[in-house]
Image (cartoon, helix red, strand yellow):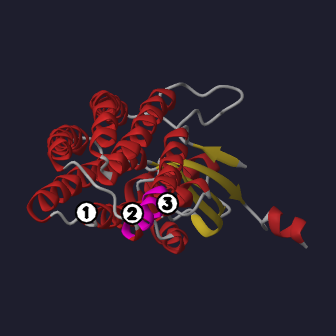
Amino acid sequence: MTGSHGLHGHGDHAGGRADNAQRIFWALILTGGFMFAEVVGGVISGSLALLADAAHMLVDTVALLFAWIAFKLSRRPADQSRTYGYHRFPVLAAFTNGISLLFIVGWIFTEAAARLVNPTDVLAGPMLVVAVLGLVVNVTAYTLLHGADRTNLNVRGALLHILGDMLGSAAAACAALTIMATGWMRIDPLLSILVGLFVLRSAWFLLRDAAHVLLEGVPEQLEVQEIGPDLVANIAAVEDVHHVHAWSLSQDRSLLTLHAKIVKDAHPDSAIADIQARLARRFDIRHVTVQIELENCTDDAVAT
């Protein structure tokens, strides 16, 4: 006998997703709009820092577009083909964003190594102007996204892209000032490498967290081994709990299945309701499938 609790959307989640989508949309407009200015400035000045930041902004524009689409899709209702709906799509978008960051860092490192061996002349004046303007745009976009839900992997991915752009613009400005003061051209690729290292570290953590959700790992805040003893200790009808499986549909939606053996005089429906209430209250898990057992576990019998 089984019981389940439907995956209901909560008003704060829906409102939060709408706010996240709106913030990402405006960050997309800012980032995509200024990207072209950086391309022109990088070509005119010959600055790798500007071109690297422009390439990063191109990836960011696409990444922010995917993130915005992901939030829109995640609000679509479930259907016969996708009974859980599209809640996993933002996590997939975040994973894709992390992969794109790895590629752009690889390009920056390759180009920087070549320029360290053979320094390229850079026009510091145009480079400084474009870098400062880019920094203003990136700070504005980052401020927009910083007010969104930063526990959401999709928002985190977008924030990391914008933060990488911000650091890229700051590095380009520092490089321009150094070149104007000393004429040392190697500062341009050196600062590009430093920015690339930061972005690489951030991309790793983003990929790790997104992959954990995609591989249906246990939610980070949940200790699965505590669930069985807690239910047995707090629900009189429950005699034993086993075959506990927990995973995440998205960052704010944990799912759980379990088998519960109940005492002979207990009512199954009441036991299921008590289990669901306890899991929601103690572990904040609101989508649960419970298999009630009165005798031996049928799964164990099949396994033997």
**Residue with the mark numbered 1:** 185
Name the residue furthest left.
181
Decide: is 178 above or below 1. Answer: below
Total number of numbered labels?
3
Which stretch appears magenta? 107-116
Number of other residues with Cα within 10 Å of mark 3, as a class: few under 14, some 14 to 19, many 20 or more: some
Q: Is residue 198 visible?
A: yes
**Residue with the mark numbered 2:** 115
Of mark 3 and mark 1, the one earlier in the sequence is 3
Give the dominant element type of the magenta stretch: helix, strand or loop. Answer: helix
Please tell me whether mark 3 sits on a helix, a strand or a loop. Answer: helix
Decide: is 294 above or below 69. Answer: below
Amino acid on which the number 3 mark rests in the picture = Gly
Task: Please give the name of the residue rendered at 14% of the width and 45% of the height, measured from the top-left corner.
Answer: 125
Location of residue 294 in the rendering, given as x and y in whole percent from the top left corner: 73, 61
Location of residue 208 in the rendering, given as x and y in whole percent from the top left corner: 50, 63
**Residue with the mark numbered 3:** 106
Label 3 to label 2: alpha-carbon separation: 14 Å
Q: Are marks 1 and 2 in contact (CB under 8 Å)?
A: yes
Horizontal side of residue 243 vs 53, given as left or right: right
